[in-house]
Image: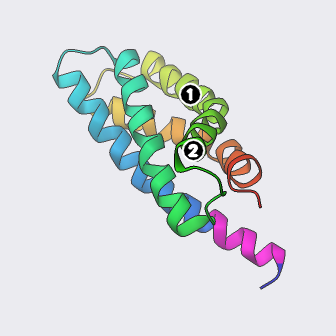
Amino acid sequence: MTATIATRVQLLRFAVAGVAGLVVDVAVLYAALALGCNFYAGRVLSFLAAVYATWRINRRYTFQPGGGSLWGEWWRYLSAMLAGGAVNYLASAAVVALAPPWPLTPALAVAAGSLAGMGLNFISAKWLVFRR
């Protein structure tokens, strides 16, 4: 398989993992909201849960494990996802600030944030966490 095709396959798998992460993100956000968190605090919790879920999926199906300790890989992954997470958080906050307060607004905000941060997160995962 050529490098270009391998990267496309990885990007597709990364996107599928991202959809799973989106489901986790939205579920944890709505649980946090139901427990009394505001949107912004809930997003911190839901982002961390989604990062954990996508790390587990991406290390198994998208990329080869980066080597070294599992604990160290987790911290590299979390660190690498923070830049995309900042883009994600800002985009979702913008949607919440601008959209009407409908029951689905938080889910739409998380989806917009996920799309906004995906490219940066893919590059970070591929070149900083799972690079061989």
Tell me residue 47's x, y (percent): 44, 33
The C terminus lies in quadrant: bottom right
Q: Is residue 30 left or right of residue 15?
A: left
Amino acid type at circle 2 is: Leu
Decide if residue 83 is on the left or right side of residue 54.
right
The picture places residue 16, in percent across and down from the top left corner, at: 49, 62
Element at badge 2? helix
Q: Amino acid at mark 1?
A: Ala
Q: Quadrant of residue 99?
A: top left
Q: Is residue 8 a member of the stretch shown in magenta?
A: yes
Residue at label 1? Answer: 91
Count of marks, rendered view? 2
**Label 1 residue SS:** helix
Tell me the chief SS of the magenta region: helix
Q: Residues within 10 Å of mark 2 (few under 14, many from 20)?
A: some
Residue positioned most to the front: 69
Query: Which residue occupies the extreme bottom position in the image?
Result: 1
In the rendered image, the vertical position of residue 102 relative to residue 1, given as above or below: above
Q: Position of residue 57 (x, y in %)?
A: 47, 59
For marks 2 and 1 on the same chain, the one whose residue lies earlier in the sequence: 1
Q: In the rendering, at what x and y percent does residue 124 appear? A: 71, 45
Q: CA distance from mark 2 to mark 1?
A: 9 Å
Q: Which residues are magenta?
A: 3-11
Q: Which residue lies at the image location 72% right of the left edge and 55% below the top edge?
A: 126
User: In the depicted view, which residue is nearer to us: 103 or 56?
Assistant: 56
- At x 49%, y 20%, the residue is 93
Using the image as rendered, state which of residue 126 and residue 26 is in the foreground. Answer: 126
User: Is residue 106 positioned above or below 66 on the image?
Assistant: above
Q: Which of the labelled discs sits on residue 115, or is there none?
A: 2
